[in-house]
Image (spheres, rainbow, N blue to C red):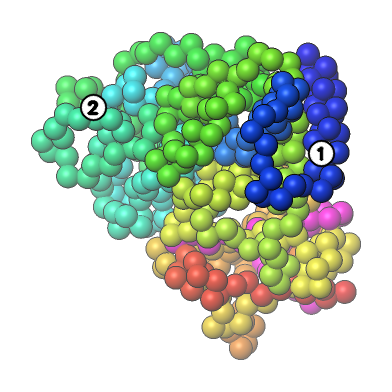
Amino acid sequence: MWLQNFSLAVVLALTVTKAVAEPPPRIEDFRSTLSRAELEDAHAARTRSLASEAYLWGLPAFLHFRQTTEIKHARRMMAPDEEPFGGWVLLRDLATPQDKNNVMPNVDTLYGASYLLLDKQGPAVVSVPAVKNRYYSVAFHDAYFNTFAVVGTRTTNGDAATVLILPPDWKAAVPQGFTNVVRAPTNSVAVFQRIFTRDEADVPAVRKIQNEIRLSSLARWQSGELGFAKVETPEFDAVVPIRETRDPFAFFEIVNRHTCSNRPASDYLALVTAFEQVGLGPCASLPSVDRLRAAIGYGAAEARLALDAAIATRAVRNGWIVPDKATGRASPDYLNRAVVQITQIASFSSDEAMYFVGRSDERGLPLHGQSTYTLTFASDELPPVDPRAFWSVTMYDAATNLLVQNPIQRYILRPTTPGLEKSPDGSLTLYFSNELPGAAPRGNWLPAPVGEFIVVLRTYLPSEAIQTGSWFPPGIKLMR
């Protein structure tokens, strides 16, 4: 069916292209009567155009649904007797090159993930312990991966806290005893915890904090218990792994269903109303007419091309991809929202963290492990982050976006790296190459693969200078 629809889509595209190539009439020379064939052509063309936009708009919701099914599967394996949603999936060890499931993993924090279904589970409570000696965060993302709340170092100053998360349509009074209350924009919510981990010796202390970050339904919390009652969620039982989805109609069926129970912000009302007219968007039913399905397939293909083009042409400065300042926030620019989620899913908003991806040197040429490069921060130009947080530089293989195996098992550099040395003038130079450069302090060397590589500069609790772009990392220089 997909191949048949794709063939029809090609025919439709050629028809539309031919029509566009002809000189259009004057604006005033409209026609009030069209043949049935012309009306069908017009509807198919409109469907194709709207499908392209609906694909980009709906991509974050698709990714959110996909992760929801994956968290349910993981929780069923880990704790088969517990309700999957509301329970934590905790990564208890730092990432290594053996981890192949997540691209560009950080080696700064231990992670935890949970998903909530507030329409079925009711209000939820998150409690965090006092964490004074390290950065940590528990971030809440809506069904489109927009960050709507963060509990952690920035918002609690490291103090213990209890926060009530209300469903979007909650109309009852807030129970007594809760001073920190957040209303979620959608029923489906993703929750991610990150806790700074200095090194392997620090892991046991971080695991203890992980165990003390708790989620519970309001009902159980009020009764002195923890956890969530079991609910029926067959919609998240994927028969075919969603990561293997190639069919655009399967994509749109998921988006239509997931956005139906997680209505988009009113800012998108006009947009989703247009989508619904061709069977796309919240609660809509896909058309059954072959020609319209072909138009949807072609529109999805156009969207993928637009997405690839947007990724390939992201703004670059000093060899670093310029971060999108709207990352983690709702935005009318749904193309860039799609780019952010496909490349950095569930990223923080800029007040919590900003990441700089370096794919080339200052000349614009790809980074290669057979050469030696330096990244030098002047004494007054080190990444300006909140003293309660940190910055780091991580090395990845460009072909896989995974960590690089190396003899000294070093995948990251940050100010606390043992043996890191500053120059006499206070500047700091980092070295990137496959083999230790003769002139480099061993503590300043980040081993690279033999082929092309990328580096990521992460800044947690970035200063206003980083957020506004008045501070930007210097270019990576070719040494030899």
The verdict on residue 445 being magenta is yes
Mark 2: few/some/many CA within 10 Å (<14, 14-19, 20+): many
Callout 2: helix, strand or loop? helix
Q: Amino acid at mark 2?
A: Leu
Q: Is residue 358 above or below residue 186?
A: below
Note whether 69 is above or below 288 in the view shown.
Answer: below
Taking the spot 17% from the left edge, 40% from the top edge, the residue there is 178
Frontmost residue, 176 versus 418? 176
Q: Residue at x 65, y 48 (%)?
A: 28
Where is the C terminus found, in terms of image quarters? bottom right
Query: Which one is in front, 370 or 150?
Result: 150
Amino acid type, label 1: Ala
Q: Which residues are magenta?
A: 436-461
Residue 468 percent across, percent down from the top left? 50, 70
Is 477 placed left or right of 410 in the picture? right
Residue 71 visible here: no
Q: Residue at x 16, y 35 (%)?
A: 174
Label 2 belongs to which residue? 218
Looking at this rendering, what residue extends furthest in the left direction? Answer: 176
Q: Which residue is mark 1?
A: 19
Q: How many angstroms separate mark 1 from mark 2 (CA)?
A: 59 Å
Q: Which mark is residue 301?
A: none
Residue 352 in view (yes/no)? yes
Which picture quadrant has residue 141? top left
Above or below, 473 against 69 in this view is below
In the rendered image, residue 262, in percent from the top left (x then y), is placed at 42, 29
Secondary element at image label 1 = helix
| Quarter that holds the N terminus | top right
Q: Nearer the viewer, mark 1 or mark 2?
A: 1
Please identify the quarter of the rendering in which residue 469 is found.
bottom right
471 w.r.t. 51: above or below: below
